[in-house]
């Protein structure tokens, strides 16, 4: 039943050489990318690898993920058996049977059950792939080929061991129920027929295994078996939401205009994608009919690298454009500008692919190298450069909201907290009401706080996410210098975009601030007994809470606003269907606040429709952009009886009636 080693040995050697060459040719292209300065923390890398690659934390967060976990760990169990299988084809005397019986018998029993579990999981996957694929293109020849080959591999295992048991050559037979059942079916055959069947099963098993090695792993999505592990190990330690800085030097190319302008981590990402479709399922652009699809974006980068990489390695020029080309391997400009930077794709990806930095890199190329961007952004960029706010309003107007209350300027050594009001809180008439409410809360709690007044400038969040890194860099440097000059160390923000920029992005400029979002700050005041209501406030009616992407997904603040609502109303807020890390974007992030939605349906309409299904009286938010988008959506849906309130307004109303 053992094959002729003289035949199998050259086949195995050739297969391994093909595997190594194929992996080198493809993964070697990753070296074309730029280093991104990402250090490797061995302990953290191992933790992330074990948690996400081996324990598959995100995979099993959904019910069907358990099916994948079964296949993955069954293969891990069968790894030793497969290695022994190949070595025994070259050196017949090598066998796991040489192990002590106390190890060999239980292990073979485990392999038998693992093979059965894999076969069952493959059957479930085939049914799901056919009847309810994760996305329409999921019914692909590649996907079916992988599943069928896995099934053939398992059947080959049962055939080999069933024949061995039938010929009384498998000492572990009592521990192998499935292979024993196969042996029982072979009982009707003569010994020489069983021998022939066993040899056929052996070669079937071998061909399936070698097909994986030579074809499916290097040239299909199954490559993620290797690259996903590396991807998880190399996870960015400071979070993928922070774009990298650029060096503005003469002769430097800015942004990502071709494959070798991506970082090596970005290029590795493109090979790690398992095409599961979870990113596109949660992407607000994809689900509302925009050209952007995170899965296809990553696939386009990989195809572009494969097409242009060999040329670039030889010092030649890329022939397939990364942006704006026709067909596969190019990303449409409309897709690049459709991103809201909500981070839903990254939060959903089981193998920790970072989609957002790639989008921002391509935006930078379009803005800084080609001056090609949506027309409505020209006014925004000019306003930011000229008057440091999106509306182009004179800086003296920043303190207009203080006309009916006494507000002190921030003084180093005297004032504990800087209230960074932000552009919306200073200039937008609706958001000014939130600023006033927050100021009254701070006063009532006896907080020592002040403002920068007309000296405050925009944090630059929208500029950076839109790809105008040059202007953002200038504004960031000016703000860092101002904060240091004024002795600012502790900051309260009411806008999550200001919060994440001051706390995360400005660290790249050496500024370490204690930045606290107003929801967390208010919750802290309540917990410390500095802010209390004399009873539950019922004036808000039924409250639903909408998670801001930049407060929630990007910074992990979920509980504070919910706790504040519970303390004010006496009841927990109602949850929308998509909440917390799966919350649906309002549509304004990534600079989309300043752009019109021309393609597909409106993102804010989708979110408002979801909220209205809960029949709320009040939708509570923690972001001025969310407030604008949801109020506009309610007007469009003629749902004027439902109001939108910021968390600060909820507390201020409760205090007023207590």
Image (cartoon, helix red, strand yellow):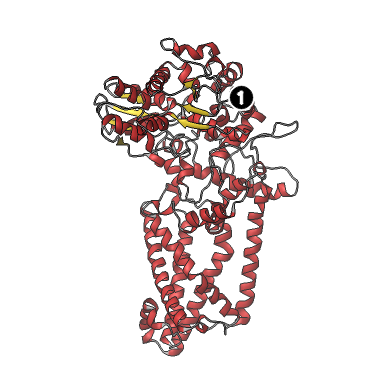
Q: Quadrant of residue 485?
A: top right
Q: Residues within 10 Å of mark 1 (few under 14, many from 20)?
A: many
Q: Position of residue 112 (x, y in %)?
A: 41, 74
Q: Position of residue 340 (x, y in %)?
A: 48, 33
Total marks placed: 1
Q: Residue at x 63, y 27 (%)?
A: 477
What residue sits right under mark 1 in the picture?
475
Q: Quadrant of residue 428?
A: top left
Give the structural element (helix, strand or loop) at label 1.
helix
Is residue 350 left or right of 440 when viewed as pictured? right
Q: Please indicate, yes or no, whether residue 264 appears anywhere in the rendered image.
A: yes
Query: Is 367 drawn above or below residue 55 in the view shown?
Result: above
Is residue 300 left or right of 658 when viewed as pictured? right
Q: Observer-nearest residue: 495 or 279?
A: 495
Q: Observer-nearest residue: 23 or 419?
A: 419
Q: Residue at x 42, y 60 (%)?
A: 69
């Amino acid at each position: 039943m053992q094959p002729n080693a003289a035949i199998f040995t050259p086949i195995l050697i050739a297969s391994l050489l093909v595997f190594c060459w194929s992996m080198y040719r493809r993964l070697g292209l990753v070296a074309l990318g730029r280093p991104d300065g990402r250090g490797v923390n061995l302990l953290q890398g191992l933790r992330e690898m074990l948690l996400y690659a081996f324990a598959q934390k995100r995979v099993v967060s959904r019910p069907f993920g358990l099916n994948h976990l079964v296949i993955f760990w069954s293969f891990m169990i069968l790894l030793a058996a497969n290695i022994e299988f190949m070595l025994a084809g070259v050196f017949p005397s090598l066998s796991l049977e040489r192990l002590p019986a106390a190890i060999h018998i239980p292990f073979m029993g485990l392999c038998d059950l693992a093979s059965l579990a894999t076969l069952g999981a493959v059957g479930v996957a085939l049914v799901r792939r056919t009847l309810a694929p994760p996305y329409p293109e999921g019914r692909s020849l590649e996907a079916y080929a992988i599943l069928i080959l896995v099934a053939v591999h398992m059947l080959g295992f049962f055939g080999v061991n069933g024949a061995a048991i039938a010929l009384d050559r498998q000492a572990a037979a009592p521990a192998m129920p499935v292979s024993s059942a196969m042996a029982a079916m072979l009982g009707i055959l003569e010994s020489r027929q069983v021998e022939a069947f066993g040899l056929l099963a052996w070669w079937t098993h071998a061909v399936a295994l070698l097909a994986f090695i030579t074809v499916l792993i290097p040239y299909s999505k199954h490559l993620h078996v290797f690259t996903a592990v590396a991807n998880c190990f190399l996870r960015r330690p400071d979070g993928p939401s922070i774009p990298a800085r650029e060096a503005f030097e003469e002769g430097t190319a800015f942004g990502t205009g071709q494959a070798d302008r991506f970082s090596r981590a970005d290029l590795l990402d493109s090979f790690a994608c398992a095409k599961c479709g979870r990113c596109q399922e949660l992407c607000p652009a994809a689900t509302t009919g925009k050209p952007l699809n995170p899965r296809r974006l990553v696939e386009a980068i990989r195809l572009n690298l494969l097409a242009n990489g060999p040329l670039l390695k030889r010092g030649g020029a890329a022939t397939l454009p990364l942006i704006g080309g026709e067909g596969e391997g190019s990303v449409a400009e409309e897709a690049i500008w459709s991103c809201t930077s909500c981070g839903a794709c990254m939060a959903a990806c089981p193998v920790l692919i970072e989609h957002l930095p790639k989008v921002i890199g391509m935006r930078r190329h379009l803005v800084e190298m080609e001056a090609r961007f949506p027309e409505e952004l020209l006014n925004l960029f000019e306003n930011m450069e000229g008057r440091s706010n999106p509306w182009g309003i004179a800086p003296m107007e920043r303190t207009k909201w203080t006309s009916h209350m006494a507000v002190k300027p921030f003084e180093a050594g005297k004032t504990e907290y800087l209230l960074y009001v932000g552009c919306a809180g200073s200039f937008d008439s609706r958001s000014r009401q939130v600023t006033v409410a927050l100021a009254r809360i701070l006063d009532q709690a006896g907080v020592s706080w002040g403002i920068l007044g007309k000296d405050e400038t925009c944090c630059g969040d929208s500029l950076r996410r839109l790809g105008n890194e040059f202007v953002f860099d200038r504004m960031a440097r000016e703000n860092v210098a101002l904060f240091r000059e004024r002795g600012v160390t502790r900051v309260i923000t009411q806008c999550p975009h200001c919060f994440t920029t001051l706390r995360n992005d400005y660290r790249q400029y050496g500024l370490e601030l204690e930045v606290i979002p107003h929801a967390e700050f208010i919750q802290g005041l309540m917990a410390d007994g500095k802010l209390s209501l004399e009873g539950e406030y019922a004036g808000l009616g039924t409250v639903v809470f909408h998670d801001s992407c930049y407060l929630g997904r990007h910074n992990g603040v979920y509980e504070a606003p919910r706790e504040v609502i519970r303390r004010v109303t006496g009841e927990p807020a109602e949850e929308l269907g998509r909440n917390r890390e799966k919350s649906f974007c309002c549509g304004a992030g990534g600079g989309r606040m300043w752009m019109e939605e021309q393609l597909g349906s409106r993102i804010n309409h989708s979110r408002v429709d979801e909220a209205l299904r809960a029949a709320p009286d009040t939708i509570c938010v923690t972001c001025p952009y969310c407030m604008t988008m949801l109020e506009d959506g309610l007007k469009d849906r003629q749902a004027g009886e439902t109001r939108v309130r910021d968390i600060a307004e909820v507390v201020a109303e409760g205090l007023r009636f207590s």
